Image: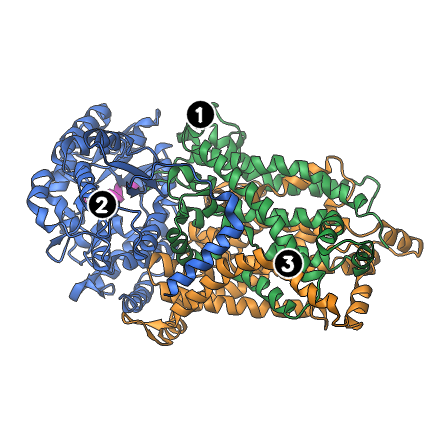
Amino acid sequence: MAKMTRRQIMALSTGLLASPLIARFAHAQEARIGFLSSQKAGAFDAVIAAFEAANPGIKMQAQNVPFDQLNAQIQARLGAGDTSVDVFTVDEPRVPAYAHKGFLSDLTPMRGEIEAAVTPAALVGSSFKDKLWSFPFWTTSQFLFFNNDLLKKAGLPAPDSDPAKRLTWEDLLTNARTAQKAGAKWGFAFDQNDRYYELQPLYESQGFGPGLSGDGLLTPALTSPGWVKTTEWYRDLYASGLSPRGVAYEQMPALFSSGQVAYMVAGVWHARVFRLAKELNFGIAPMPYFAGGKPVTPTGSWTIGVNPKSARQDAAMKFAKFLTLDGNGALLASTIAPQPPVNKVAFEAYLKRESEAGGGNTAAFAKIISHELANTTVSRPRTIGYVVFEEIMNRMYSDIRNGAEAKSSLERTQAALTAAFSRLE
Amino acid sequence: MKQTYHPGPLAIAVAASVAAMLPLIWAGVSALRPSAEIFQYLSPLSIRTLVPTQITFDNIVALWSGQFARAMFNSALVTALTVAIGLVICSMAAFALAALNYRGRSVVFTAMIVSFLIPFDSIAVPLSQVFRDLDLQNSYAGLILPGIGNGLAVFLLRQFFLGIPRELSEAAMVDGLGWFGIFTKIYVPLSKPALIGAGLILFVFQWQAYLWPLLIAPNPDYHVASVSIASFAGQYDVDYGQMFGGAVFTALLPMGVLLVFQRYFIASFASTGSKD
Amino acid sequence: MMTAHSSSQDTATAHKAAAAPKSHRTVSEGAVAAIFLAPAIVAVLVLRIWPTGLALWQSFHVGAAGRFGLANYTFLFSDPSFHDALAATLLFSLIVNPFQIACALGLALVLNRDLPAGPLWRTLVLLPVAVPQSVSAIIMGVVFRPDGPANALLATIGLPAQGFLTTPEQALYTIILIVSWIGVGYWTTFLLAGLKEIPAALYEAAVIDGANSWQQFRFITLPQLRRPLTFVLVADTVANFLVFAPVQILTKGGPQGSTNLIMNDIYARGFLSGDMRGAAAETGILVAIVVIIVAIQFRMMTGAKSE
């Protein structure tokens, strides 16, 4: 009833104010499947064209929003029951929260289909409480990039690209300090400086856990001696001047490209950008681990979700499957994106493409990435509180990077998380 | 306040302009650099900070052959319409609040004031759902509507209208003019500076709008400039060259318009004519 | 506002004192007013006031069942992040408003003079406000990087490098500089328009009476600028309470909550953490604070008269 009155008021005012304005471009009023992502405009043009050609009668509408707005968009629109979004990209760690809120269709009946098409490690990211909620799409991994010229200047050997012979953090930092003394502006840096995604492996490598425990992983566990010690290690990177403060993570790769950093742990996709820097002579090696611990790498990326309230479920599902399970579709959907696709067929093509493109610099690309994805990955905690957790943790890491004391920051953050989790419904 | 030529004020004016422009010059120059070079010469300061080693138009070309051109058109259209319609609506309301007497006038004025105290971003989400219910998403109407009823512009115009003496209206009535005639033939012509000020307010609101266009118009055909530029920030990589280039063009368009309107500030002094 | 008439105040007072007789003309004035007001009132009610009421309504509902309660507010008052937000916003307001208005007034006085290429300078200072806020924040963030041009400039004049946005002591002041870079030109423009409305005859008469520059400023310029200054004071204060784009892009409220301006806290709470009701409650508190402050400013600037 109230809605009717509201509509009347709105319609009246809209009429008064905007009658000459309701001239919209006449898009054909057939229902279009809305596909929301944060990729650059045009990133999915090829795959959409192929899909429409193979499925006459289904028309797609790509919607793009900037990356840091996607979460807000999804919450706002799907939270209000918006049906103009049928298919959308879902960041893996958000799958539990979105499943809990009813933003995702249950895909468990299609488990067989999905398992057949994608690499096994990819299923974790789409799962929650033993059900599958999204189609695995892309994944990520990290390399240790190093600047050959800076290493040579310091008399350091290039790290071995054999995953069995990877450097320990202890050795790496020693080398990094040597390189800095020999002239490198920064000895070592993470590219995603203050993000839990990049730093979680530091704790997991030593068996200190992801920082969450308990039922539903909703109890913060940040104050163990292991956590404090490792966080102080992280703080010291910046306090000692080995790594730079105050540079946003988007501007970090530029530091490596311009030859200011000797060693950088960064996402595998940066290889593309680094290749473009003509004066940069770089190599890749596996990500380091703590001596006495296990090698652990971060992983996880986008998956594809289908809105359970979609007015055209069948068509939406078809498109989602084409993007992810169909070899050709997955290939077309990944050519522009630099992240590795998880579709088996597309992944092989991706490895081939990247290995060939790199020349001498990145000969070990396929070897390292295949090993990591099969053996060392740790997924981010599967909990409905992950989004809140990540926000608060990232803020904490930012403070610590700027010099805040580790132990008190962890304690404060633990209290903040407990309070924030109490607000979850 | 006309003064003979003193170097001091000119120096200050130039310094202020330079301070305003320098970061934007750096950004504009960055758009003409190869991407790898953009952050290379920040420190120590050298000629290279503002002069590229090589000029490349790749970023500009890529920028204008992409969605940005459409977004600039959308922004220009939406903003122009917002200012035009908004000026009419807001000046009419200001007139009612300043020149007419009736019960409840202060209540209405209070409502106008309170309306611009409300952070629009806080109410954008529920409002966008209403707009979607009315099928106003991905439309120019959806982009324009929230910008036309601007309490701050009403406030500005009302303050100005209060200074126009009531005798003028009364004299006009004696001559047979109705309220609408008084509004259009007396108040509006006397108010050019206030109208320009109100226009500036309406313009800035719409030109800077980001969250609302994002919520209501995610279709790339209806992106506005601010959204289009933000799209250059990918998840892991930011295309700074195109982003900065886009930002500079986004600023240059209104600057050209403003340079034209600048003359009115001086002209208005002569046109407000009879001071008592 | 910009007075078209120097004796407007007398006229207005006289007019109010006359207490317009409720003749047929007053009644129809109300009707006329209704027509003039209609579009704006509808726009303001429907597009601002009503959604705010809705959000406030939401803020008084608690739990999955949506029962009525104050828990959203009590949570806020116990949340250290909210305390940071109040403290940071209060400190920010106390400094940024006088700073920006003083700069804007000074710059307006300068630009009001007959300068060569005057229109050019007046337009250039407006340039920063025409750049989308997300990008101006990024650009200024680069300027203030520890390895960036600001420190490089300090180095050339022999001063040590500063932490700017990386230290809790300096971050808020850096944000003040950034928002001032964006906004001062904008406010200058309004004051400039106000200055242009002051009749030259007043100054000429004062000069004849032997008044010096300072006396002219104090006894002519400032009183004549009362309406524009009121406008700028109120509008700037409100705008500064609603600052959040530079914070959200550059510091996310850090380091250690020192730049956690209240609008950023609301944004993080509502859009990032998904606590819409908490964000609605916080918005309610913000609006209440701003209403009180604006009311005080009105009283201060207009004296006993309620304008």
Mark 2 nearby-residue class (10 Å; few <14, some 14–19, many ≥20)? some
Report the number of discs.
Answer: 3
Can residue A173 be found in the magenta stretch? Answer: yes
- Say which element carries label 2: loop
Please state which of the two labelled residues, at mark 2 or mark 1, is closer to the viewer.
2
Nearest the viewer among B172 and C176 is: B172
Q: In the figure, what tint was chain A given? A: blue
Task: Tell which subunit mark 3 falls on.
Answer: B
**According to the image, label 3 marks what residue?**
B155
Asked if one can make out residue C236 in the rendered structure from this viewpoint, the answer is: no
Q: Is residue C89 magenta?
A: no
Label number found at residue B61: 1
Badge 2 is on which residue? Answer: A312
Residue C250 as seen in the image, left or right of residue C196:
left
Quadrant in the rendering for residue C278: bottom left
Residue drawn at x 40%, y 30% is B66
